[in-house]
Amino acid sequence: MFQVEADTVEGELVAVTGSSGELGRWGRSSVLPLVRESDHSNIWRLGVDLGGEEEHHYRYCVVVILNTEAQPCLSQHPMVNSEANGKQKVIVRRWETHLVPRRIPANGNSDDGNVETFGDFGGRTRVQRGWLAEEMLIQFKLCPGGVTLYKRKHQRPGTRFWVKLTPLVKESSWNPEAEMAEESLDIQDVRSRLGGWPIVEAASLTEASCHRRLQPQHGLEYGTDDQTFLCFEAQILNLNSTAFLVDIYSRPEAQSEQEVPDHVGMCYIYPDNLRATIGSLSCPITSMRFQPIGKLTVDYLVTHPSPGVEMDFSESLRNHWSDDWKGLDVGHRGLGNSYTRGHHCSSIKENTVASMKDAIQHGADMVEFDVQVSKDLVPVLFHEFKLCVQTRTKAGGELMLEVPVKDLQLQELQRLQIHHPSEKETGVKSWGNAGDEEHEPFPTLELILERLDSSCGFNIEIKYPGMMKTGKMEYEGGNPMEMNLFLDQILKTVLSHGKERKILFSSFNPDICTMIINKQNKYPVLLLTAGKNDKYDYFMDPRTWTIGNGVLFAEMSGLLGLSAMAEAVMRDPSQLEMVRRHGQIIFTWTDEKNDKDTVKALKQLGVNGVIYDRMDWNNDKLVKESIFMTKERTGDVLSSGVSSEGSDYSPLSSPERSPQRKEESLTFEGKICLPTQ
């Protein structure tokens, strides 16, 4: 008998999954729903006849099971894997992610009749969000200037605003515009109509509201400062049949906190507005009498599940980091930047097999490298968005032509005589190893995964340009290809060839981080940021502006942490306390400041990894081997480590409460928060 105490909201069910055939062999579509003890109970039970000769491992999960009409199955015992209900869709909301799952010994019983607690096992609470499998995720982002109201009374200093997003599913007998002619629907009415699906959660880039959760009655407060960032996430099945209602509320400064905000106006976002994967849209805000009173400007992102990729419940390292993985030595592009004019310029061409191998031989725990996707959809290693090809003019002179990486197929990238863009100004650099495959640029990601020592971890930076604060793209050639398609190629390669290697993903683009954390449940993701600095241009996205904003975004999205420029960290080491308080990890990259003293100073600050050039010069290890090789060789058991759940933990919504993290340890012990009734 499986018995567990778990809190849920309307539409959610508790289920069990496990290693044996009777428990579905960890399959998402084969979970066994438990039966709620009573309508007002949070105890769930299920009797399963288990084979006595086999040890059974199992986990609990919270799911939404949708029927053929895309409505949650609310019966006492919906059989997900039965032939009759083969068209049901299982949406994973959250699941237990302890490294070692619960177990029932051979010929034993499931915990001898004791009622277990969801997520709590072995003295630790480990719960994280699910992953996209049959549903898509629509994200709406409100930045500074997102809400513009024309009337003077709404422009008075001290006026506060709230924004709420409500999904409207198209039904043949329901005309949302006609129904809302008098006033906008309250979200509780819509949820009653839709039975708990679609699901909308929201968060803001503030300490108080950085946890994604179901919206309170009037949505989230929208600030008017230049740091404002609100994010609304909707899980839906069919974009073509879902519209969104946006309600705007306000409260003048003179009104007390106890007074209900005034309903100022509303606007609609229709499916036709969301034809691209990523974009920005504007729509008029109208009063209850349909008079135009303002404008809503919102950025959006559409994330699809990766086709052909089937994740399961067997294991997840997406939010796990061992306690003793500190101060890791990470080789930047292998042995280092090979085109810098600094003293630390690598003697081996960057982002090549040879450069990676040399860093590993000199004791790298991990290597960091840049991945893009060729025109024929092959993930390859290269840092710049463009390359140079040398040709001749009609007069016989030499000419360097710039070509976007995205416009060339793998065969062209590997067969053409390629030059780095910097060589256009500094002249062609001679390496003396022409024809040696391991020194050639554009090795495939698959080759790197298969050829390098498996004890060396990978920090895979995903190169995808973003919009700069100046209003120009990071790379004027535009985006390489549709973002979902781009990431799917990288994910399929890593999931097929990553095996047991320790792997992190990272990117300067927050939308890339959002997509990749939702498309898979196995690998951690870090946001790259230069932090507050006067060295690099800022991106348009406020999530990247400071280390503090990055921490809040990581909390909001369920990332493991950050990878920040070392200078920004060393300028104000107190920022590390915020990282630790949120149970996250932080890597640092040294940029142009590459020397032993800098690497040592960063390690003394307690960062989890240092990404630097010239592993052969700056690594002071006595034994030149990866920490992961040392663990494997000595048979040392890894500690239970950091569990940086963040909003990936998906606490149940409560506008008055926020889950608290224990400050004395990097290990998070989550709390379930019930929605206020």
Image (spheres, grey):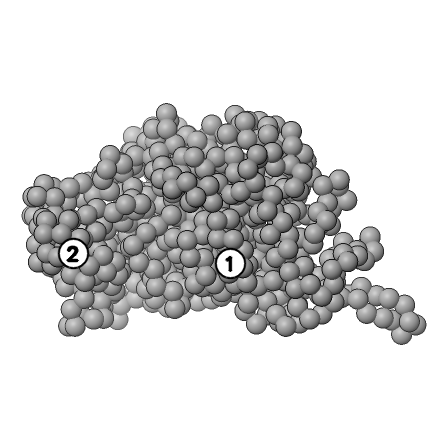
Q: Are marks 1 and 2 in contact (CB under 8 Å)?
A: no
* Residue drawn 67% across the image and 34% down it: 595
From the viewer's perspective, is 338 left or right of 69?
right
Instruction: Specify whether residue 164 is in view.
Output: no
Near-viewer residue (399 or 313): 313
* Residue drawn 25% across the image and 47% down it: 101
Work out which residue is located at the far right of the displayed protein and give it: 395
Structural distance between the alpha carbons of marks 1 and 2: 35 Å
Expressed as whole percent of the image width and height from the top left, the position of residue 90 reads 25, 61
Work out which residue is located at the far bottom of the displayed protein and give it: 394
Expressed as whole percent of the image width and height from the top left, the position of residue 572 reads 57, 27
From the viewer's perspective, is 145 left or right of 537?
left
Expressed as whole percent of the image width and height from the top left, the position of residue 373 reads 57, 64
Instruction: Specify whether residue 367 is in view.
Output: yes
| Circle 2: element type | loop
> Which residue has dot 1 on it?
449
The disc at residue 54 is 2
- The type of residue carrying mark 2 is Glu
- Which numbered mark, 1 or 2, is in the foreground of this view? 2
Near-viewer residue (90 or 495): 495
* Residue drawn 29% across the image and 41% down it: 126
| Circle 1: element type | helix
From the viewer's perspective, is 274 left or right of 89?
right
- The type of residue carrying mark 1 is Leu
Near-viewer residue (153 or 169): 169
Above or below: residue 278 compared with residue 360: below
Sequence-wise first label, 1 or 2: 2
* Residue drawn 61% across the image and 70% down it: 410
| Quadrant that contains the C terminus | top left
